[in-house]
Image: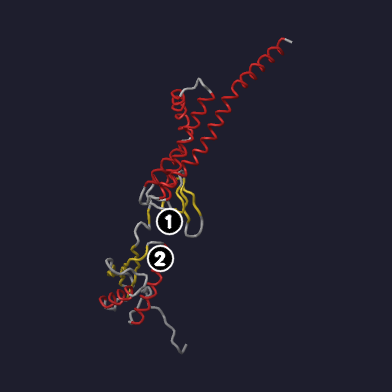
C-alpha cells in the first residue's frame, strides 16, 4: 500500500498546483485573445496607412506580415511571463538566442528562402506581372511570397520557385522595359543588288503596325556571304511581352516575304554543286 499512497500524494500535489495555476492560465488565455484582436486592429491600421502609399502590393503584404509577427511575439512573451512568474524577459531572450542556433541549423533552407524573399520584395526590378527567365524556367511572375515565388509559364503550367534560386542565380527580366529588340535573318540571291534589297526589306518592316517607330529605328545590315545567299540581319523594336514579340515577328516575316516577291527579289533555296570523278552517262529522251 505504500507505493499507492505515494502515487496518490503526488497526484494530489499535481492537482493542487494545477488549481493554483488556473487563474494565471485564464489570464494568459485572455492575453492571447487580446493579442489576436490587437493583431487584427494593427493589420487594419497598417492596411489603411499603406493604402495611401505607392508601394507595391507584395511590399504591403510584407509589412503587414512583419507587424503581425511582432504583435504575436510580444503577446506570447507576456502570456508566458504571466503563466510562469519565474520566467523573466531576459531569460526568455537568452533561451531564444540558444534555441535560434539549433533552429537555424535545422531550418537553414527555410530561413534562406525567407531572407531571399524579403530582399526580392524590396527589389524594384522584378515585379508581379513581369516575364522572367531563370535556370531554364520562363514565364510571368504571378505571386511573390516570403518563401517562394509563382511563375506561370506560357504553356499554362505553374512553377513554384524557392526564392533562394531567384536570389542566387542570374534572372533575365524580359519586360523590364516597354520595348524589346527582335532580330531575324533574311537572305537574298547573289545576283540581287544589295542596296536595293536592303531598301525593300527596310520599307516593309517600317510599314508593320507592331514595329515601334521613333527613337529606335529599323536596322537592316548585310551580315554574311552564306552558301546560297547574302544574309541580312533585320532588327526592330516591339512590345516586350512574349506574345507581342511573336505577333511582331509573324507580321514582319510575312510583309518582308511579300515585299521581296513584289519586287522580284529571290529568297534562294540552298544550292548544291555535285562533282563526279568520271563522266556520268545521261540517257537521251529517245531512249
Residue 157 percent coordinates (x, y): 51, 56
Q: Callout 1: few (<14), some (14-19), or many (20+) C-alpha neighbours within 10 Å? A: some
Q: Does residue 93 lie above or below 131 as drawn? A: above
Can residue 275 be spotted in the picture?
A: no
Mark 1 or 2: in front is: 1
Query: Label 1 to label 2, Cα distance in Å?
Result: 15 Å
Percent from the top left, x then y, of residue 245?
Answer: 39, 65
> Residue 93: horizontal and vertical position, in percent?
44, 26
Q: Residue at x 58, y 28 (%)?
A: 26
> Relative to the observer, which residue lies in front, 206 or 198?
206
Report the residue marked by disc 2. 244
Residue in the foreground of this view, choosing between 65 and 101: 65
Labelled disc at residue 231: none
| Mark sitting earlier along the chain (1/2) | 1
Q: Which numbered disc covers residue 129? A: 1
Looking at the picture, how far across and down is residue 114, in whole percent?
44, 41
Apparent side of residue 55 relative to residue 220 in the rendered image (left or right): right
Dot 2 crowding, Cα within 10 Å, few <14, some 14–19, many 20+: some
Residue at 40% from the left image edge and 52% from the top image edge: 127
Circle 2 SS class: helix
- Residues 252 and 40: in front is 40
Which residue sits at x=51%, y=21%?
85
Q: Is residue 25 above or below residue 228?
A: above
147 or 260, which lies in front?
Answer: 147
Amino acid at each position: 500500500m505504500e507505493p499507492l499512497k505515494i502515487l496518490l500524494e503526488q497526484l494530489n500535489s499535481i492537482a493542487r498546483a494545477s488549481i493554483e495555476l488556473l487563474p494565471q492560465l485564464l489570464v494568459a488565455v485572455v492575453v492571447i485573445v487580446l493579442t489576436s484582436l490587437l493583431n487584427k486592429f494593427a493589420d487594419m491600421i497598417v492596411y489603411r496607412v499603406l493604402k495611401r502609399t505607392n508601394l507595391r502590393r507584395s511590399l504591403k503584404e510584407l509589412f503587414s506580415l512583419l507587424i503581425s509577427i511582432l504583435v504575436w511575439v510580444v503577446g506570447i512573451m507576456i502570456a508566458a511571463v504571466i503563466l510562469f512568474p519565474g520566467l523573466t524577459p531576459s531569460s526568455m531572450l537568452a533561451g531564444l538566442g540558444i534555441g535560434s542556433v539549433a533552429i537555424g541549423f535545422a531550418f537553414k533552407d527555410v530561413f534562406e528562402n525567407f531572407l531571399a524573399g524579403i530582399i526580392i520584395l524590396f527589389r524594384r526590378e522584378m515585379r508581379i506581372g513581369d516575364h522572367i527567365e531563370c535556370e531554364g524556367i520562363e514565364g510571368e511572375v504571378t505571386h511573390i511570397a516570403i518563401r517562394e515565388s509563382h511563375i506561370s509559364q506560357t504553356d499554362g503550367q505553374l512553377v513554384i520557385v524557392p526564392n533562394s534560386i531567384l536570389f542566387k542565380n542570374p534572372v533575365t527580366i524580359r519586360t523590364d522595359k516597354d520595348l524589346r529588340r527582335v532580330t531575324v535573318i533574311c537572305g537574298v540571291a547573289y545576283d540581287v543588288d544589295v542596296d536595293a534589297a536592303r531598301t525593300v526589306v527596310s520599307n516593309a518592316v517600317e510599314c508593320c503596325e507592331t514595329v515601334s517607330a521613333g527613337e529606335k529605328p529599323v536596322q537592316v545590315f548585310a551580315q554574311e556571304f552564306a552558301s546560297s545567299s547574302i544574309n541580312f540581319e533585320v532588327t526592330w523594336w516591339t512590345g516586350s511581352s512574349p506574345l507581342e514579340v511573336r505577333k511582331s515577328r509573324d507580321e514582319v516575316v510575312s510583309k518582308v516575304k511579300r515585299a521581296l516577291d513584289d519586287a522580284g527579289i529571290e529568297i534562294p533555296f540552298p544550292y548544291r554543286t555535285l562533282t563526279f570523278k568520271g563522266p556520268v552517262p545521261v540517257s537521251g529522251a529517245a531512249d
